[in-house]
Amino acid sequence: MANEKRKKLTPVQQEYHLFEKERETKRPIVRNCVCAFLVGGIICTIGQAISYFYMYFFDFTEQTAGNPTVATMVFLSMILTGLGFYDRIAQFAGAGSAVPVTGFGNAVISAAIEHRTEGFVLGVGSNMFKLAGSVILFGTFSAFVIALVKTIATQWGGL
């Protein structure tokens, strides 16, 4: 806490702040970073293997294999979340499992599972995109803006 803010605290608040700081659990930051790096790398390696699978067996190119690879990774993360495995991976890896595209699938299904007791329409249907809705909205809007800028720049001969 900054010294200026600490000066504004009452003596009881300052004492409580010291009490709290002494008992705060120390987080293993290096261990968490290593776990996130390793699990995120494993997820990306699996994604690369799936991409090579599509290129080898279905005659996709590097450019066209991306979409089915992303769809497969999201689908796999949704299945693993439904079975309860992805949550264990996320507890171990933290951001290493949330940052790749698989975290998106996990967010969608987690909200759906949480509200399944309310029914399929009002529970699952209305709450499925509660967490991931903002990602979809801003991702779609950003893609639109970038495509618009690129189209305008191309028309003027820039890019």
Image (cartoon, rainbow, N blue to C red):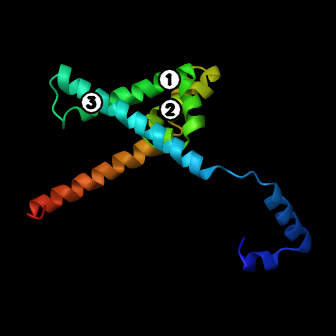
Residue 137: image location, x then y, percent:
41, 45
Which one is in front, 145 or 49? 49
Residue 109: image location, x then y, percent:
51, 28
**Disc 2 target residue:** 106
Which quadrant of the figure has residue 58? top left
In the picture, the quarter occupied by the N terminus is bottom right
Circle 3 crowding by C-alpha within 10 Å: few under 14, some 14–19, many from 20 = many
Q: Earlier in the sequence, mark 3 or mark 2?
A: 3
Amino acid at pointer 3: Ser
**Disc 3 target residue:** 51
Circle 2 crowding by C-alpha within 10 Å: few under 14, some 14–19, many from 20 = many
Disc 3 is placed on an element classified as helix
**How far is mark 3 from mark 2, CA to CA?**
20 Å
**How far is mark 1 from mark 3, CA to CA?**
19 Å
Q: Earlier in the sequence, mark 1 or mark 2?
A: 1
Residue 83: image location, x then y, percent:
55, 19
Amino acid at pointer 2: Asn
Q: Which mark is residue 139?
A: none
Which one is in front, 150 or 67? 67
Q: Which mark is residue 80?
A: 1
Name the front one of labels 3 and 2: 3
Name the front one of labels 1 and 2: 1
Q: Is residue 111 left or right of residue 41?
A: right
Which quadrant of the figure has residue 57? top left
Residue 17: image location, x then y, percent:
82, 65
Disc 1 is placed on an element classified as helix
